[in-house]
Amino acid sequence: MKKIEKFLIAQNDMVENPGSYIYHSRKPRFLIEITDLDLNSKPDPEAVAKSLVYINPESLPELYELTIIDNIDNAEKEALGKHLHFALKWYKEYLKWEDGGHSAYLKDFNERTASLKIIYSNPAQKWVVVYKGEIHSFDSEPEMDEYLYSLGFTDDDLESGFILHIEE
């Protein structure tokens, strides 16, 4: 018997607003809902979820949230988080494949702040920080700066760098 793939994309096109899902077919089996990341909502602390910033071939950011909505095998939250991390990496590769194998990369803020990325969304009036795989949004620049200082960054580290501005 052929073993099915570990991750499968699922969608029901027969409904009015079909969602997108990832099914993890091996133990622990679970279903992930893929949604656009809502910068204006507070994350559910009970949810097993991860956020993803994908830069498409037009160099525009796409922000997604992957949330486990069905824990079929009743796995521990820690185990689900580990597997969700792999699902996030798989989904990023899927997006690249869907786009024809091309993807841009979000640049680091500067040479001193490896893996720190900063986005400003004008429509949402939000600052978004991507650091070591985590995504956090802030209502103001001082609020964002306070978070960055808590990570150990200094004024010298944050003096100047690349900020991706989303205008529409």
Image: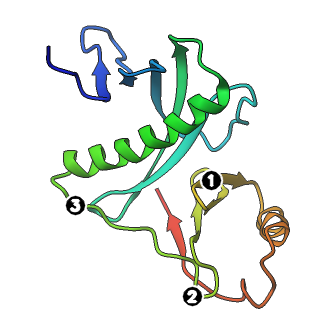
Mark 2 residue element? loop
Which residue reaches farthest front? 1
Identify the image quadrant of the N terminus.
top left
Spatial CA distance of label 2 from label 1 is: 19 Å
The reply, left or right, for residue 159 in relation to residue 25 is right
Circle 2 sits on which residue?
111
Residue 130, how many percent across, how many down?
60, 60
Q: Nearer the viewer, residue 78 or 148?
A: 78
Circle 1 sits on which residue?
134
Q: Which mark is residue 102?
A: 3
Spatial CA distance of label 3 from label 1 is: 23 Å
Is residue 18 visible in the rendered image? The answer is yes
Residue 36 lies, with reference to residue 139, above or below; the image says above
Q: Amino acid at mark 3?
A: His
Q: Nearer the viewer, residue 71 or 111?
A: 71
Q: Earlier in the sequence, mark 3 or mark 1?
A: 3
Residue 74, how many percent across, how many down?
59, 12
Q: Earlier in the sequence, mark 2 or mark 1?
A: 2
Q: Quadrant of residue 26?
A: top left
Residue 25 lies, with reference to residue 118, above or below; the image says above
Q: Identify the residue at horizontal 57%, vertical 40% (top origin).
A: 50
Q: Amino acid at mark 2?
A: Glu
State if disc 1 and disc 2 touch (CB < 8 Å).
no
Q: Which mark is residue 12?
A: none
State if disc 2 and disc 3 touch (CB < 8 Å).
no
